[in-house]
Structures are given as structure tokens and as C-alpha cells.
Amino acid sequence: MATSLQETSLQELVAEANAIMEPEAFADYCPNGLQVEGRAEVRRIVSGVTASQAMIDAAVDAGADVLLVHHGFFWRGEDPCVKGMKRRRLQRLLESGVSLVAYHLPLDAHPVLGNNAQLAKELGFVVESGLDGSTRPVGNVGRLSEPMAARDFAAKVASVLGREPLLEEVGEHPIHRIAWCTGAAQSYIDRAAELGVDAYLSGEVSEPTIHSAREQGLHYIAAGHHATERYGVRALGAKLAETLGIEHQFIDVDNPA
């Protein structure tokens, strides 16, 4: 497609995003793609991690036609009633004519634009394989360009992501091979241990995670759910804007979790 366009249709944008993300290949906990339909013409995408009220307000204020996120609406098992917080979020989108487009597992798993691929790029990991053994893995296994002490690696993570990670240092062995999965993926630590890596990095931590790390002899780093998942949606927004010839702005509404 030509990149000189200043406007595209919502239909074309969603079709392009779906072609890249291939949501039909995933059994997800939420709908992927267009979740809330706004105006038919699109000149500007605003991307962000989560469709919170603050993110919606920021997108509207920035002149967005489409808000592109990783964490959207309509999660499996949630109360379907449109009231309170959910009503206020939907009302702002609908009154402003801003569409909500969201990709969850497809954005975790994409081999180039995905959260895990982009985090690897930010931290300088060499990707070797998938973590879960599927054809569309949502986590990865790889290596650092050169071995690093666990504390030095944690310091690098802090510098790149702009927040201090939780480090559970287990023994004195350096980190060379590493497994990682962004977001709430702490339960994959046992799979990482089976693969014989030196360390495992995820976004969140649970109480059993530390015991697993200690008893299986691998360093563990919890770098933040939000902090580890900023990069995929930003990359997807930039790719769509480049392909369709429209504007893109990434807005980071911080979350310490």
C-alpha cells in the first residue's frame, strides 16, 4: 500500500491489523480486533498498554480516531453488565467516536512485533526458540550476548525499563541462557527450569514463584506486567501507521504493577 495516504478507513485498518496479528489462531480470554466501533475514517492511532479511563481520556485528548491496546475489554468470566467503571469507559469512547482495537495473546506471540520479541530487542536477547513448545509461543528461550552476573543483569533491566525489578538471586552462577514471558506469566517458571536456563524473567511474581526459583536453581526477575508489555503495542501501532500512511502516537499511562 502507498504510504502517502493521510486517511484510511476503520475497516481497512482493522483488516490490516488482523492480517498481521492472525487472531483466529488463538484461543484467547477476550475478543481480539475491533472491540468498540467509532468513526469510519482514521487519521491517527494512539497506542497504549491498557484501556483504562486514564488511557481513554489521554487518547481522546490527543485526537485519536483509534485507541490500540494490549488489554482491552470483555474478558471471559467478568460481569457483563455495563455499569459503573465499565459504563464510564464505554461512554467516553462512544461519545468521542474513538474506536477500541485490542490484541491480547496475538500481541504476546507475534515473532517480530510481539511483546516478547520487542522486549528481547530492548534487552538485547538472542531468541532461540519458543518457551511453551507450541507453533505460536507466547514466551521465548534465548541467551544474552555475553554472560552477566544476576545483579548486573537486574541493573540493566532497571535501566532499560525505567523501574527496579524484583530479583531473586539463586546461587552465584552467571546468566547466559534465559527464558522470558511478559505480563502475568510467572507460572511458566517450571517450564523454564525444565529447559535448563540460568534465569527466568516475567512481568509478575506470585508467592510460589520464589520457591520454584530457589528449589530449581535459577535466578528469577519480575520486571513488571506493565513495564514488560509497553513495546509490542507501540511496535504494532507504528507498523500500521507506516503501512497505511496515517499518524501514530504511543502514550504510556504508567502502572507500577
Image (cartoon, rainbow, N blue to C red):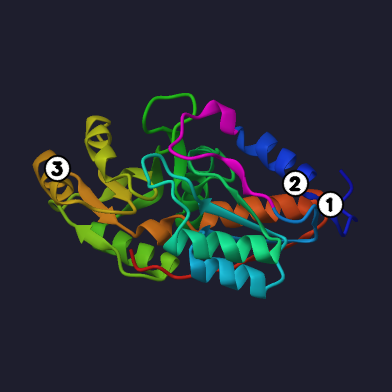
Q: Residue at x 54, y 51 (%)?
A: 232
Q: Are marks 1 and 2 in contact (CB under 8 Å)?
A: yes
Q: Which residue is mark 3?
A: 212
Q: Position of residue 140 (x, y in %)?
A: 41, 38
Q: Residue at the far bottom: name it.
A: 61
Q: Position of residue 42 (x, y in %)?
A: 79, 57
Q: Residue at x 19, y 45 (%)?
A: 218
Tag 1: residue type?
Answer: Thr
Q: Is residue 255 magenta?
A: no
Q: Considering only order in the chain, which callout, 2 or 3, is on the residue closer to the N terminus?
A: 2
Q: Residue at x 39, y 25 (%)?
A: 133
Q: In this orientation, does residue 133 appear?
A: yes
Near-viewer residue (226 or 168)? 226
Magenta part of the protein: which range?
Answer: 23-37
Q: Residues within 10 Å of mark 1 (few under 14, many from 20)?
A: some
Q: Considering only order in the chain, which callout, 1 or 3, is on the residue closer to the N terminus?
A: 1
Q: Residues within 10 Å of mark 3 (few under 14, many from 20)?
A: some
Near-viewer residue (28 or 173)? 28
Q: Which residue is mark 2?
A: 13
Q: Which residue is mark 1?
A: 8
Q: Secondary structure at mark 1?
A: strand
Could you say which quadrant of the image residue 157 lies in?
Answer: bottom left
**Is 148 positioned to the left or the right of 229 in the image?**
left
Tag 3: residue type?
Answer: Ser
Q: In this orientation, does residue 46 appear?
A: no
Does 70 appear above or below 30?
below
Which quarter of the figure is the C terminus placed in? bottom left
Tag 2: residue type?
Answer: Leu
Q: CA distance from mark 3 to mark 1?
A: 49 Å
Q: Nearer the viewer, mark 3 or mark 2?
A: 2
Q: Secondary structure at mark 3?
A: helix
